[in-house]
Image (cartoon, helix red, strand yellow):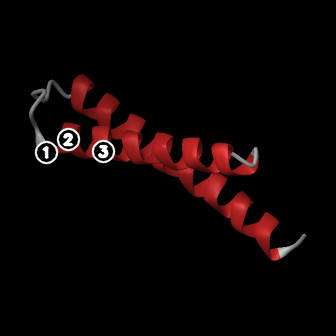
Amino acid sequence: MTGRQAHRNATLVLSLLMLSIGIALIVETVLGYGSALSPRMLLGVLFLAAGVGRLYVEIKRGRGA
């Protein structure tokens, strides 16, 4: 495995981890009857957006675009 492949794999793993954390925070807030404007919900949405953004950029870069 080259350094570039290791970096790509690490980026994909960390992006999926960020997605998982975001989803967990959102689900925990909703099931705990938290408000839509709670800091936990905001963090969940931000983690979700960051994970999706990182995945999108990595996939686009992998295609050579």
Measured Cα–Cα span from mark 1 to mark 2? 5 Å
Disc 1 vs disc 2: Cβ atoms closer than 8 Å? yes
Q: Which residue is located at x 13 percent, y 45 percent?
A: 39
Q: Secondary structure at mark 2?
A: helix
For badge 2, the amino acid type reads Leu
| Residue 63 x/y as whole percent | 76, 44
| Residue 36 x/y as whole percent | 13, 27
- Find the residue positioned furthest to the bottom: 3
Which residue bears the numbered disc 3? 46
Which residue bears the numbered disc 2? 42
Give above or below for 29 relative to 7: above
- Find the residue positioned furthest to the front: 65
Q: Which residue is located at x 47 percent, y 49 percent?
A: 18
- Quadrant in which residue 31 is drawn: top left
For badge 3, the amino acid type reads Leu
Q: Residues within 10 Å of mark 1 (few under 14, many from 20)?
A: few
Q: Secondary structure at mark 3?
A: helix
Of 59 and 51, the residue lying toward us: 59
Q: Which residue is located at x 20 percent, y 41 percent?
A: 42
Drawn side of residue 64 relative to residue 2, left or right: left
Drawn side of residue 60 relative to residue 1, left or right: left
